Image: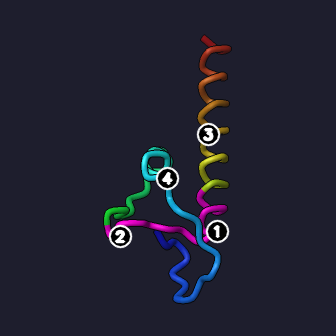
Amino acid sequence: MQTCLQVHCNDFETIDHTTTVVILNILNLTMDLAISDEPVVCKNCSRSVKMAFDFKSTCLFTEELRYVVCS
């Protein structure tokens, strides 16, 4: 998974397929993880995706909480 489109990126981590698919679905992103037998992501991209996931999760939690409190 390469979100930065950098040709040379030295700091990679292995992708946990199940967790990554859930995160990508929540963020409404589509990436072909089957393109490689052992997909990796550079750490900068991993941090960016995690920050986006954390932000969206917080927004969804706040929205849910607001719905419960206001109902």
Closest to the camera, between mark 4 and mark 3, is 4
Q: Which mark is residue 66?
A: none
SS class of the residue under badge 4?
loop
Q: Residue at x 67, y 55 (%)?
A: 51
Instruction: Tell me which amino acid carries mark 1.
Output: Lys
Under circle 3, the secondary element is helix
Stretch in magenta: 35-49
Disc 2 vs disc 3: Cβ atoms closer than 8 Å? no
Closer to the camera in the image, 29 or 11: 11
On the image, the x and y values in percent for residue 55 come to 66, 47
The disc, 1 or 3, on the residue closer to the chain's N-terminal end is 1
Q: Residues within 10 Å of mark 1 (few under 14, many from 20)?
A: some
Q: 58 and 20: which one is in front?
A: 20
- Which of disc 3 and disc 2 is earlier in sequence? 2
Residue receiving disc 2: 36
- Find the distance from the CA under tag 4 to the CA under tag 3: 19 Å
Determine the image quadrant of residue 71.
top right
At label 4, the amino acid type is Asp
Please name the residue shown 64% across and 68% down the image. 43
Q: Earlier in the sequence, mark 4 or mark 1?
A: 4
